[in-house]
Image (cartoon, rainbow, N blue to C red):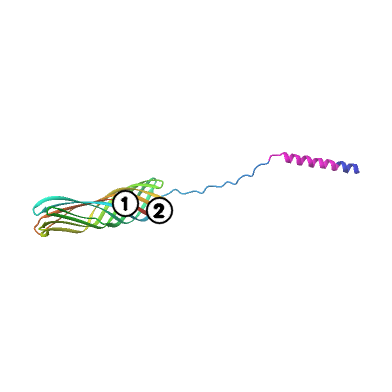
Amino acid sequence: MKMVFGAAGVLLALTVSVGIARAADMPVRPPVAPVVKAPVVAPFTWDGAYVGVHAGYARARVATDGDFDGERTTHHSRDSFAFGGAQIGYNKQSGSFVLGAEADIGYLGGRSSLLVGDHFTDFRMGWYGTLTGRLGFAWDRSLFYVKGGFAVADIRNTGADIDGGAFDPNNFSVLSGSRGGRVLGAGWEWAFAPSWSVKLEYLHFDFGNRSGADVDGDTYTFRNRVQTFKIGLNYLFP
């Protein structure tokens, strides 16, 4: 009996030894790394409302055609000046196309006086506003657009004669007040952050012709045009 148990013990020991050896020879598989899914980032869109501010450089050109004491003459006045203001607007994007509306309000600090012989002309500009439509093409966070619409500005035009160093009250014409006109332009806007964008824009204002007369019945026609180059900063509402 002892011999039987002894043989069984030896056989069990050999079986265990062989199993351990085989287990040691088996290749070890590396642990499988968990699959991490990248977050889904929504594409940028220009949809929604925005507000902002702007500042820049303006050039005004005014043509005054008048009967200066019976002498029909046209004089051109020019001025360059800084300007600034604020804007509000709304965009709707469809594919790569963006349709929007924008309103501006600001201040034009233009003023120029011209004396040629005894002919005197002067213009002054103050506040201004625009209401425009925008049509743009979006390329990711860049927006290239054109715009156009209506403009209004506070403008004062003067045409007069100077006799002996003083204004002749009979040859003095002033038109002052709000002038309506049209505005056209183009620009580029870039969204540098999810809710912020910067833009560069050119606008051409044309306030048309306005006519007045002095005491003597001499007539004067004024044409006011302004070009602006500006940089703007917008906050885009989410």
Residues under labels 2 and 1: Cα distance?
Answer: 17 Å
Q: Residue at x 27, y 52 (%)?
A: 58
Q: Quadrant of the N terminus?
A: top right
Q: Which residue in the structure is indicated by mark 1?
A: 230
Residue 112 coordinates in the image, percent (x, y): 21, 55
Q: Counting residues from the N terminus, which is met first, the one under dot 2 or under dot 1?
A: 2
On the rendered structure, is 166 left or right of 41? left
**Is 60 included in the stretch rendered in magenta?**
no
On the rendered structure, is 103 left or right of 220? right
Q: Which residue in the structure is indicated by mark 2?
A: 196
On the rendered structure, is 170 left or right of 77? left
Disc 2 marks a residue whose amino acid type is Trp
User: Which residues are drawn in magenta?
Assistant: 8-27
Q: Residue at x 79, y 41 (%)?
A: 17
Residue 215 coordinates in the image, percent (x, y): 10, 59
Residue 238 coordinates in the image, percent (x, y): 42, 55
Residue 198 coordinates in the image, percent (x, y): 37, 51
Q: Report helix, strand or loop for mark 2.
A: strand
Quadrant housing residue 220 = bottom left
Quadrant housing residue 121 = bottom left
